[in-house]
Amino acid sequence: MPYVDSFARPIEYLRVSVTDRCNLRCRYCMPEEGVPPITHEAVLRYEEITRLVRIAVTMGLSHVRLTGGEPLVRRDIVDLVKQLAALPGLDDLSMTTNGMLLERYARPLAQAGLQRINLSLDTLRPERFHAITRLGDVEQVLRGREAALAAGLRPVKVNTVVIRGMNDDEIVDLARLTLLPDWHVRFIEVMPLGAGAEWSARSSVPIAEIRARLEAVWGPLTAVRGELGVGPARYYQLPGAAGTVGFISPVSDHFCHLCNRLRLTSDGRLLPCLMSDHAIDLRTPLRAGADDAELQAIFRQAMLEKPREHHLAQRPLPECALPMSTVGG
């Protein structure tokens, strides 16, 4: 059974950032020149990540997602997946990726024990994709998606951050993909973290507006019953659709009352809340020789320090200096 936090929420989901580095420069995530990288010495080694995840799993955090930065740019990432997949009690091991390297890694990841993929894809238009990511190739990402499905990494959920004036004119086109088999598209409000703060303040599209645009075309959406994951998305289907449309509203209609997660940064800090700078140092005691019980106590501390809710709807926005590339999406 998972532990609960101070507000009786069961904590069962750990997001692990394995690197702050990325092979794209998405405009709402980081500046064109990138962000100062965490030093090699500060980044957790694979054996350290595996030990911390093992301890977390013994506390009921049975769902683990690997994030970045871009997790596939870290050398020997398949080895880490294999180590984690072998942990007793880990029920669900997934990854969020931008897909640029997925065509190469999909099958080895699946063979190592990865179960499913979330894929960042904000547009279907090649020129716009390159403009948003500054470096990317949408066809390469789409080939990566096909490779993931062929390797058995199902479902592949597409994450689309919607920004007014940038890609909000594609909402209907992206949702239409879910009429086809194996397409699951999730629309996400831009979060005011790092470079996203500027975009959120001026260009955020509320989930209620996104849903209204879809219903203007297809009529009322049908809520999907059953378990489609342990994350915050609310899932629906278009009439006659094979796949699903998901909505994630961290700002306009937050889901803090259902928050079930902790985040481990690539440099070994434990975040009770993504939307806060408050972090608990795990790396120092880990490298100083702390035993499992001492590290377990730090995880418990992080659970108990989870706030009731964030305050992203405030104006001005509360300060959060940690960039998305550090904390992981």
Image (tube, grey):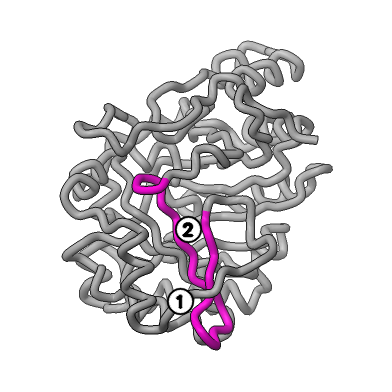
* Amino acid bearing label 1: Pro
Q: Is residue 132 left or right of residue 214?
A: left
Report helix, strand or loop for mark 2: strand
Q: From this view, report whether residue 172 is shown above or below residue 252.
A: below
Label 2 crowd bin: few (<14), some (14–19), many (20+), radius 10 Å? many
Measuring from the top left, give residue 80's x and y in whole percent: 64, 46
* Amino acid bearing label 2: Thr
| Residue that sits furthest to the front in the current view | 220
- Location of mark 2 (residue): 97
Label 1 crowd bin: few (<14), some (14–19), many (20+), radius 10 Å? some
Magenta residues, as a range?
233-253
Measuring from the top left, give residue 232's x and y in whole percent: 53, 51
Q: What whole-number distance in Å separates the C-alpha atoms at marks 1 and 2?
A: 31 Å
Measuring from the top left, give residue 185's x and y in whole percent: 47, 70
Measuring from the top left, give residue 198's x and y in whole percent: 18, 44
| Closer-to-camera residue (272/116) | 272
Report helix, strand or loop for mark 1: loop
Q: Is residue 179 magenta?
A: no
The quadrant holding residue 36 is top left
Q: Residue at x 52, y 41 (%)?
A: 18
Q: From this view, report whether residue 243 is shown above or below residue 329.
A: below
The quadrant holding residue 311 is top left
Q: Find out whether the residues at labels 1 and 2 contact each other: C-beta distance under 8 Å.
A: no
Pair 1/2: label in front: 1
Q: Residue at x 54, y 65 (%)?
A: 235
Say which mark, if any, is on residue 220: 1
Q: Residue at x 33, y 66 (%)?
A: 210
Q: Residue at x 62, y 22 (%)?
A: 6
Q: Earlier in the sequence, mark 1 or mark 2?
A: 2
The quadrant holding residue 131 is bottom left
Q: Is residue 258 left or right of residue 82?
A: left
Say which mark, if any, is on residue 289: none
